[in-house]
């Protein structure tokens, strides 16, 4: 079986053009606590031609672009720019856009984002603790902020998903807000960030995911398994991926690259070859879910999959 023939919807990636657009963390505001450590190698343009070069050995049939920390004073600007990119390159297929939830103009921005047909969801990162033992200075912008929660609840009105990106120590806390939006699909980013690879750390992360998996509107992206100051560890990440699939089932999991961010730790080719290897003994139906079908359904993509041409 030629694994590279498996249709792939890359459920999470980014584009940026630093010559034309402003991304503070890439342009002039270095994030000392970036979760993968030194990220200076990301400070260059990453556009569809770069992505296609990275993915040349794989059957990419669609992609989902997730907001990339574009200038927050112009939240809809990134979506407008991506519309032009899509028109020119036929990528990305869909977009998870940005909107602050706790600001006065939250609904105005969400409404504008929803007006773009290819926008399928919102990612709005709540303020989080740098480590579990920290305390909040205040609750503004956190998942405990009532204004933030009110903004989150607007997603149902505008028929948008919510991409949830938080460290593992906030996963249990997120249960409160997930239950506020039972009719909204919530997609946990990056496998819930199992950064603490100690026995206790993994156990706590797994138990948190088991609780969230009981909520029928929760899905999860199998992506970004890099850890600061460590190489990409196949055996550790294989166990993590299999744990997540066991907890959520393939029909609620989707593979993604998080490129170009993940390129700090692994090439696209090696990443997806690892995904193929890890799921080698899975059924045809399970592979379809993991590599494209879950993403297709959750993000309501208008794609026709010619399954007869694949070798799943």
Image (tube, helix red, strand yellow):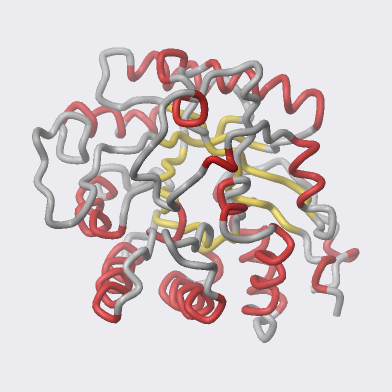
Q: How many marks?
A: 0
- Residue in the image at 74% along x and 43% along y: 51
Looking at the rendering, in which quadrant would you find the C terminus? bottom right
- Residue in the image at 35% along x and 18% along y: 107
Q: Nearer the viewer, residue 240 or 197?
A: 197
Residue 31, image x, y percentages: 38, 37
Q: Is residue 134 left or right of residue 250?
A: left
Q: Is residue 251 left or right of residue 199?
A: right
Farthest-out residue, right = 309
- Residue in the image at 57% along x and 30% along y: 119
Q: Is residue 149 above or below residue 229?
A: above
- Residue in the image at 65% along x and 64% along y: 271
Q: Nearer the viewer, residue 181 or 32?
A: 32
Q: Is residue 286 above or below residue 289?
A: below
Residue 199, image x, y percentages: 29, 81
Can you tell which quarter of the image residue 13 is in?
A: top right
Farthest-out residue, bottom = 281
Residue 285, image x, y percentages: 68, 74
Looking at the rendering, in which quadrant would you find the N terminus? bottom right
Residue 18, image x, y percentages: 62, 24
Q: Is residue 204 above or below residue 217?
A: below
Q: Is residue 57 above or below residue 107?
A: below
Q: Is residue 263 left or right of residue 144?
A: right
Can you tell which quarter of the image residue 116 is in?
A: top right
Q: Nearer the viewer, residue 238 or 217?
A: 238
């Amino acid at each position: 079986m030629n694994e590279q023939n498996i249709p792939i919807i890359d459920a999470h990636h980014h584009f940026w053009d630093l010559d034309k657009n402003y991304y503070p963390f890439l342009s002039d505001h270095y994030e000392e606590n970036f979760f993968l450590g030194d990220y200076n190698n990301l400070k260059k343009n990453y556009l569809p031609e770069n992505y296609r070069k990275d993915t040349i050995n794989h059957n990419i049939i669609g992609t989902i672009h997730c907001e990339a920390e574009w200038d927050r004073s112009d939240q809809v600007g990134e979506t407008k720019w991506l519309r032009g990119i899509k028109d020119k390159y036929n990528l990305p297929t869909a977009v998870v856009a940005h909107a602050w939830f706790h600001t006065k103009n939250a609904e105005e921005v969400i409404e504008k984002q929803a007006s773009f047909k290819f926008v399928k969801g919102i990612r709005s990162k709540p303020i989080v603790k740098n480590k579990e033992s920290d305390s909040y200075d205040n609750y503004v912008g956190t998942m405990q902020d009532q204004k933030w929660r009110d903004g989150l609840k607007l997603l149902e009105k505008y028929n948008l998903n919510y991409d949830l990106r938080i460290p593992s120590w906030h996963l249990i806390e997120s249960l409160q807000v997930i239950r506020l939006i039972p009719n909204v699909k919530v997609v946990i980013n990056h496998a819930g960030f199992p950064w603490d690879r100690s026995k206790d750390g993994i156990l706590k992360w797994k138990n948190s995911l088991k609780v969230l998996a009981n909520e029928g509107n929760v899905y999860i992206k199998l992506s970004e398994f890099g850890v600061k100051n460590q190489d990409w560890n196949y055996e550790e990440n294989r166990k993590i991926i299999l744990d997540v699939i066991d907890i959520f089932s393939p029909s609620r999991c989707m593979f993604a690259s998080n490129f170009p961010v993940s390129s700090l730790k692994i090439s696209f080719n090696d990443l997806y070859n690892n995904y193929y290897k890890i799921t080698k003994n899975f059924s045809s139906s399970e592979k379809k879910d993991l590599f494209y079908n879950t993403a297709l359904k959750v993000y309501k993509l208008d794609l026709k999959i010619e399954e007869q041409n694949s070798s799943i």
